[in-house]
Amino acid sequence: KAGVTQTPRYLIKTRGQQVTLSCSPISGHRSVSWYQQTPGQGLQFLFEYFSETQRNKGNFPGRFSGRQFSNSRSEMNVSTLELGDSALYLCASSGGGGSKYNEQFFGPGTRLTVL
Amino acid sequence: AQSVAQPEDQVNVAEGNPLTVKCTYSVSGNPYLFWYVQYPNRGLQFLLKYITGDNLVKGSYGFEAEFNKSQTSFHLKKPSALVSDSALYLCAVRSEDTGRRALTFGSGTRLQVQP
C-alpha cells in the first residue's frame, strides 16, 4: 500500500505570495490532518478533515486554510506569506474514520521557505 | 488542555547499551499515547501506541514503552541501541475526553548513538 504523498517537496516563495500544498492520503483513509513543524515551536496542529468537512482546527490565523476533496485528497493554502511561515508542513492520514484509537501516518512533508 | 513534556533535548548512548527517552503527559480523562521517530528530511514514522491494557507496549524496530499512570509517564526504551537509531523521537498524546483527533506533540528528543 502506498504511503502518504505530499507535493511539492520543496517550495520557495516571497513574502506576500500565496501557496498551495497537496496531500494524498493512504488509500482508504478518509481522515487527513495537517501540521506545521518549526525548530522553535515544534509540531503544531493546523486542521483535520474528514469526508470533505473540517472537523478540527488549531490555533492558526485565517491565512491558513484547507479543503478536502471527494477522493480524500487534501490541499492547504497559505495566503499573504510571512517569513515566520517558513516550516516543514506535514500531512497525516488515519483510517478507521479517524478514530481516537488509530495512529496517524505521516507524509514526507513539504519544506516551505519564505524569503 | 493537553500537553506533553520531553525533558531532554538530546540523549547520547553508546551502541549496544540500553536507551531510554522520557515523556510525561497531561490530559483530562484517559490518555492515548504515541511514539514517532523522525529521520532527517523525512516525515514521522509510527513506532508504537498505548490505548489500554498492558502497561508495557512493544513496537517497531525493537522499541518498547512503559505506561505509568501514577507518574503520567510513557518512556520509550530499547534494550540495545543501534547507530541507525539516531534520530528525533517525538511523544504525542490524545485525550479520549475531547472530540479532537489531533495529536499534541512534545518538543522532541534527539537520540545520538555513538559507535
Image (cartoon, rainbow, N blue to C red):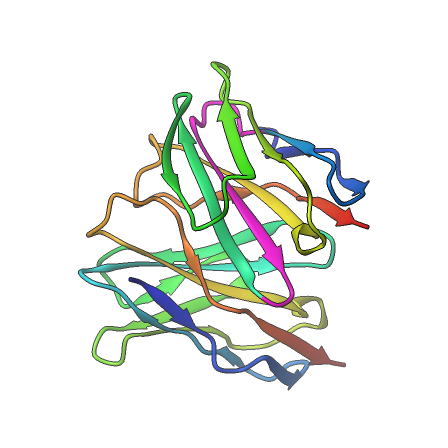
Horizontal and vertical percent for residue A21?
66, 33
Q: Residue at x 53, y 29 (%)?
A: A26
Q: Is residue B66 magenta?
A: no
Residue B5 position (above or below residue A17): below
Occupied quadrant, residue A79: top right
- Residue B45 seen in the figure: yes
Horizontal and vertical percent for residue A23?
60, 30
Q: Residue at x 55, y 39 (%)?
A: A64
Q: Residue at x 70, y 34 (%)?
A: A18
Horizontal and vertical percent for residue B64?
44, 67
Quadrant, the N terminus of chain A: top right
Indicate left or right for B19 with B42 as reference: left
Residue B15 position (above or below residue B89): below
Q: Residue at x 53, y 47 (%)?
A: A35
- Residue A87 seen in the figure: no
In this orientation, which residue lies closer to the viewer: A70 or B112?
A70
Indicate left or right for B72 with A71 as reference: left
In this orientation, which residue lies closer to the viewer: A81 or A94?
A81
Q: Is residue A36 magenta?
A: yes
Q: What is the tally of numbered marks visible in this picture?
A: 0
Occupied quadrant, residue B19: bottom right
Residue B100 position (above or below residue A18): below
The residue stretch that appears in magenta: A24-40
Horizontal and vertical percent for residue B96?
22, 51
